[in-house]
Image: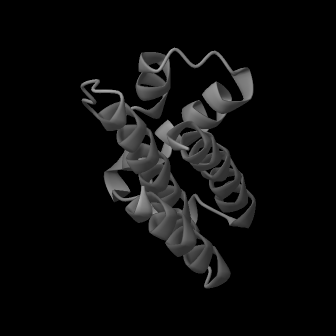
Amino acid sequence: MAQAERDLGKARVDLEHGYHEWACFTAHQAAEKALKAVMERLGKVARGHSLLGLLQGLDDGDEARLHGARVLDRYYLEARYPNGFPSGAPLDYFDEVLAREAIDAADAIVRFCRDHLG
């Protein structure tokens, strides 16, 4: 969980310095690590990188968090690799609005996990 919190802080630094694609990816990483911390605590197997799948594995039916997971899942590959888009590089496709949305979604998931862990 400590690494999830640190990654969320790094996403905020990326946003502050205009690395919007990295803010989106790092936000995904924060949420993934937080969810996997909860799953580990519960003795559940956590496979893959899909936040939606991990939340569903926790039987979380909160629509806002599920939406946030869907938003973040789009950033797992596309934020890092130029071949994720028809042309250009990830830096051409990410902006401050997307980065803030990703950080907000990750923050909600991390808070949920922190509360769940007690």
**Can residue 91 be seen in this snapshot?**
no
Q: How is the image coloured?
A: one colour
In the foreground, 13 or 5 = 5
In the foreground, 2 or 62 = 2
Residue appearing at x 57%, y 31% in the figure: 70
Left or right placement of residue 63 versus residue 42 in this view:
right
Left or right placement of residue 44 versus residue 58 in this view:
left
Query: In which quadrant is the N terminus drawn?
Result: bottom left
Left or right placement of residue 39 versus residue 7 in this view:
left
Of all residues, the one furthest to the front in this rendering is 118
**Can residue 104 be seen in this snapshot?**
yes
Query: In which quadrant is the C terminus drawn?
Result: top right
Residue appearing at x 50%, y 63% in the figure: 5
Residue 78 placement (x, y as % from top left)? 42, 49
In the foreground, 38 or 99 = 38
Quadrant in which residue 37 is drawn = top left
Residue appearing at x 61%, y 42% in the figure: 115
Residue 85 placement (x, y as % from top left)? 44, 48
Disc tally is 0
Of all residues, the one furthest to the bottom in this rendering is 17
Residue appearing at x 36%, y 47% in the figure: 77
Residue 97 placement (x, y as % from top left)? 75, 59
Quadrant in which residue 64 is drawn = top right
Residue 106 placement (x, y as % from top left)? 59, 49
Left or right placement of residue 83 versus residue 19 in this view:
left
The image shows residue 28, relative to residue 70, as above or below, that is: below
